[in-house]
Amino acid sequence: MKQGIILLIILMVPALSYAQPGSESQLPEIKFDAESYDLGIVTQEMAMHSFKFRNTGTSELIIEKLVPS
């Protein structure tokens, strides 16, 4: 029983350290001018379109991975 309580405390400390009040206001937030674009019928091997976006949050926005659909 004592080991179970100690294990619970050890597991809860990291979770509680991430739950800081007011931290939502310091998050990055991405806003797109348009979220989709219709390329129509593509007759070439490659089609391109650029999506414009901006960070409307208060901290740095880091994009680590892009996946086309």
Image (cartoon, grey):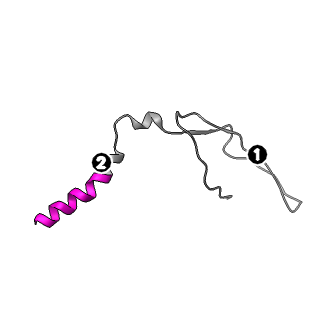
The one of 36 and 20 positioned closer to us in this rendering = 20
Q: Please tell me which residue is depicted at 84% across the width and 56% down the height of the picture.
A: 41
Question: Which secondary structure, mark 2?
Answer: helix
Tell me the magenta residue range: 1-14
Q: Nearer the viewer, mark 2 or mark 1?
A: 2
Give the amino acid at mark 2.
Leu
Of the 4 image quadrants, the one containing the C terminus is: bottom right
Q: Please tell me which residue is depicted at 65% across the width and 55% down the height of the picture.
A: 66
Question: Is 20 on the left or on the right of 65, as rendered?
Answer: left
Marking on residue 50: 1
Question: Is 8 on the left or on the right of 34, as rendered?
Answer: left
Point out residue 14 in the picture as x, y percentages from the top left corner.
32, 53
Q: Please tell me which residue is depicted at 83% across the width and 55% down the height of the picture.
A: 47
Classified by dominant secondary structure, the portion drawn in magenta counts as: helix
Q: Which residue is mark 2?
A: 16
Position of 22 relative to 1 (above/below): above
Q: Is residue 46 magenta?
A: no
Q: Residues within 10 Å of mark 1 (few under 14, many from 20)?
A: few
